[in-house]
Image (cartoon, rainbow, N blue to C red):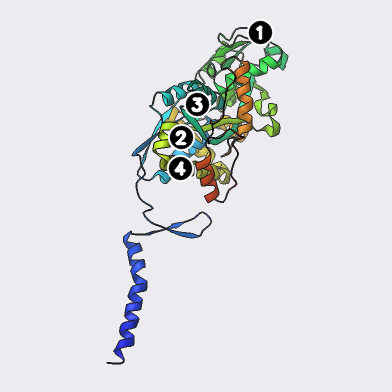
Amino acid sequence: MSAARPLTTLRAIALTVALPLLLTACGFRAEAKKEDGRTNLAADVDKPLSASEVRIGYFPNLTHATALVGLQEGLIQKELGSTTIKPQTFNAGPSEIEALNGGSLDIGFIGPSPSINGYVKSKGSNLRIISGSASGGVKLVVNPEKIKTLDDLKGKKIATPQKGNTQDVAFLNWIAEKGWKVDPESGKGDVSVVRTDNKVTPDAFKQGSIDGAWAPEPTASKLVTDGGKVLLDEGFLWPENKFVITNIVVSQKFLKEHPDVVEAVLRGTVKTNGWIHAHQDQAKVSANTKLAADTGKPLDAEVIRPAWPSLTVTDDPLAATLKKQADHAVMAKFIEQPDLNGIYDLRLLNKVLKAAGKPEVSDAGLGAK
């Protein structure tokens, strides 16, 4: 009997060691691999998030590549688990802001000018910018038979996507810096600013009803394939060629009620941007596949080839450039001098970035307290 006691003891020890492993296999605990390869034990990693769905808006433009690729590759949905994405597409920022204000949208990929407008008009009560998404990707493309130099724009008809949208404000500011006069409301003046849906702009250009456009990609490159010439890349107007073209915004109500869902979306966008940088060729195909699904037709190779490298996906909201764009909107008389304090809430983004071993980003002193 004396020999049996050590064996019993060993069996008890073995059971003690094996029990946590058995519980892990049964789902009481789960092993989650961190991005750096280390293992982290976390309880209930598959626990449902606080909302059954999240409504996400974006444009079928390459400047919204994070949304296009993140949705197409399932990188955002993967982070959300059982929370379903309800995607919605928009042509330009003001209409997306209306959806956000009206409660039919929770999170949106959107340009800086409508972000500013939406924040100011709600007196800071509606949205928050929670991340950057893209920089660049905007060009002035013209009919080279009618316009050979920038000075030749005077008296011509130039399209922008929508009154008060990011490209509209940028173009009006450029016109003002030239010393020319244009009424921001009507678009009439030394240059005729013709507000035209991006989907319609190429046909309007071919028909001659416009002489050019200050347009985001892929519209800009479509115009080039139709005989247009790039006269100016907006990036050249900014230090280091960097300026925010797309932010990620959230309804403050949704952020307050479902911070776990917002954080999951941000994990998805950060991973998407990292995947895009590491897989440029695959990402370009992925974005084009999603554009085809959203618009009914993929971009031609001669369109996407020059368009894709002209923009950069980024988690950084480039907050200092938003300040400048706010000044442009003031000059265009779309808004009074705004108080943008609190427009950013980058706490969840910086939490996600820190967990991924990436540097945190700045809100340029405009963060929520």
User: Residue 173 vs residue 275: left or right?
Assistant: right
Task: State the mark number for residue 98.
Answer: none
Q: Which residue is mark 4?
A: 263
Along the viewing direction, whichever of 225 and 70 lies nearer the viewer: 70
Q: Position of residue 45 (x, y in %)?
A: 38, 53
Identify which residue, 259 or 369, lies in the foreground: 369
Distance (Cα) linking label 4 and label 1: 47 Å
List x then y, in percent, for residue 144: 67, 17
Within 10 Å of disc 1 (Cα), the crowding (few <14, some 14-19, many 20+) is some
Determine which residue is flagged by label 1: 190
Left or right: where does residue 216 sit relative to residue 152? left
Q: Quadrant of residue 303?
A: top right
Which residue is drawn at the image coordinates 51% and 54% (left, top)? 35
Q: Residues within 10 Å of mark 3 (few under 14, many from 20)?
A: some
Mark sitting earlier along the chain (1/2)? 1
Tell me the kind of residue under disc 2.
Lys
Residue identifier under label 2: 290
Q: CA distance from mark 1 to mark 3?
A: 35 Å
Inter-mark Cα distance, 4 to 2: 24 Å
**Mark 2 or 3, closer to the camera:** 3
Distance from the alpha carbon under mark 4 to that under mark 3: 21 Å
Decide: few, some or many residues near mark 2? Use Cα within 10 Å; few <14, some 14-19, many ≥20. Answer: many
Mark 4: secondary structure = helix
Q: CA distance from mark 1 to mark 2?
A: 39 Å
- Name which residue lies at 56% across and 42% down: 281
Q: Is residue 34 above or below residue 82?
A: below
Q: How many marks?
A: 4
Q: Amino acid at mark 1?
A: Asp
Looking at the picture, how far across and down is residue 18, in whole percent?
35, 71
Query: What amino acid does circle 3 point to?
Result: Gly
